[in-house]
Image: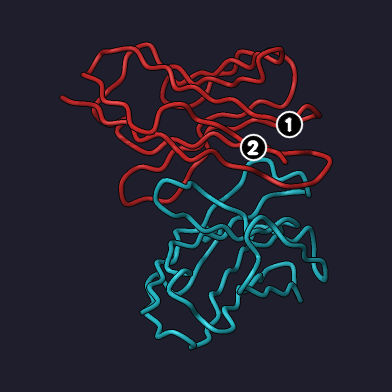
Chain colours: A red, B cyan
């Protein structure tokens, strides 16, 4: 069965620190990869996505993610976090054959001012 | 520009009661889905639909029914509510059937006593 693993459940950083959130998935076929963010009190929104092409994708608010096919990974990065980045981050994998999305358990990021 | 609209935002039920969570989208999206979000478990897919008249089960379909009589609406029915169904429910839609660029509703917080 397809699964998505996010390695860190809760990350606490100070402002200006660098961020990397891990995401690994298990499915070996063609996938679309996503990172979603849920800010406190708001619904989920798309942060960035990868379908094909350049494995380094850039999203909103200075986030980027790198798809490494050999490692089945799609880690999220940001060089310098801000207090406003405090949120829940979800990695998601869409199985194009089955037409289903699988989400990771989420990582709570707390940025201290 | 309404996007994905979920109602109600909050609901409290007694065990055994039935109810319908409404979801409507005005973007003419073919793909719609229902998720539940539980602490530490991320989002789990309940049911999804790739078009009017077509529905399929997701990861946790038991206790829920769906129908898709129109492109716009995708209601989720709880036939006999149980405390285990206490959760936050998200409806989502996307253009096409690949599930990319999911648009989420704002969520329905359901408590079953």
Seen in the image, is A14 located left or right of residue A57? left
User: Residue B27: percent from the left, percent from the top?
Assistant: 65, 57
Q: Secondary structure at mark 2?
A: loop
Q: Residue at (45%, 21%) from the top-left corner?
A: A63
Disc 1 crowd, CA 10 A, few/some/many (<14, 14-19, 20+): some
Residue B34 relative to residue A105: left or right: right
Q: Is residue A89 left or right of residue B5?
A: left
The N terminus of chain A, quarter of image:
top right
Q: Position of residue A5 (x, y in %)?
A: 55, 31
Work out whether B40 lies above or below B57: above
Label 2: chain letter: A
Q: Which mark is residue B24?
A: none
* CB under 8 Å between discs 1 and 2: yes
State the image coordinates of residue A6 (x, y, percent, origin top left): 50, 30
Which percent across, then down, holds residue A61? 41, 25
Residue situated furthest left in the rendering = A113
| Numbered disc 1: secondary structure | loop
Q: Is residue B87 above or below residue A105?
A: below
Numbered circle sitting on residue A3: 2
**Disc ID at residue A27:** 1
Q: Is residue B21 above or below residue B91?
A: below
Q: Chain of mark 1?
A: A
In the image shown, does B64 or A45 lie closer to the viewer?
Answer: B64
């Amino acid at each position: 069965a397809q699964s998505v693993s996010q390695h860190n459940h809760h990350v606490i950083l100070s402002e200006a620190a660098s961020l990397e959130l891990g995401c690994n998935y298990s499915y070996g076929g063609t996938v679309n990869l996503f990172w979603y963010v849920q800010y406190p009190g708001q619904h989920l929104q798309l942060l960035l996505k990868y379908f094909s092409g350049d494995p380094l994708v850039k999203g909103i608010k200075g986030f980027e993610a790198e798809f490494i096919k050999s490692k089945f990974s799609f880690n999220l990065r940001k060089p310098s976090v801000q207090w406003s980045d405090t949120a829940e981050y979800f990695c998601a994998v869409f199985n194009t054959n089955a037409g289903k999305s699988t989400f990771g358990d989420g990582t709570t990021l707390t940025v201290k001012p | 520009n309404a996007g994905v609209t979920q109602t109600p935002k909050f609901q409290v039920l007694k065990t055994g009661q039935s109810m319908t969570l409404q979801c409507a989208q005005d973007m003419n999206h073919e793909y719609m889905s229902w998720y539940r979000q539980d602490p530490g478990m991320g989002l789990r897919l309940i049911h999804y639909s790739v078009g009017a008249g077509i529905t399929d089960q997701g990861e946790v379909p038991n206790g829920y029914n769906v129908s898709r009589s129109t492109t716009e609406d995708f209601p989720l029915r709880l036939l006999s509510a149980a405390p285990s169904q206490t959760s936050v429910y998200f409806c989502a839609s996307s253009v096409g059937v690949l599930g990319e660029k999911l648009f989420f509703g704002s969520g329905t917080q359901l408590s079953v006593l």
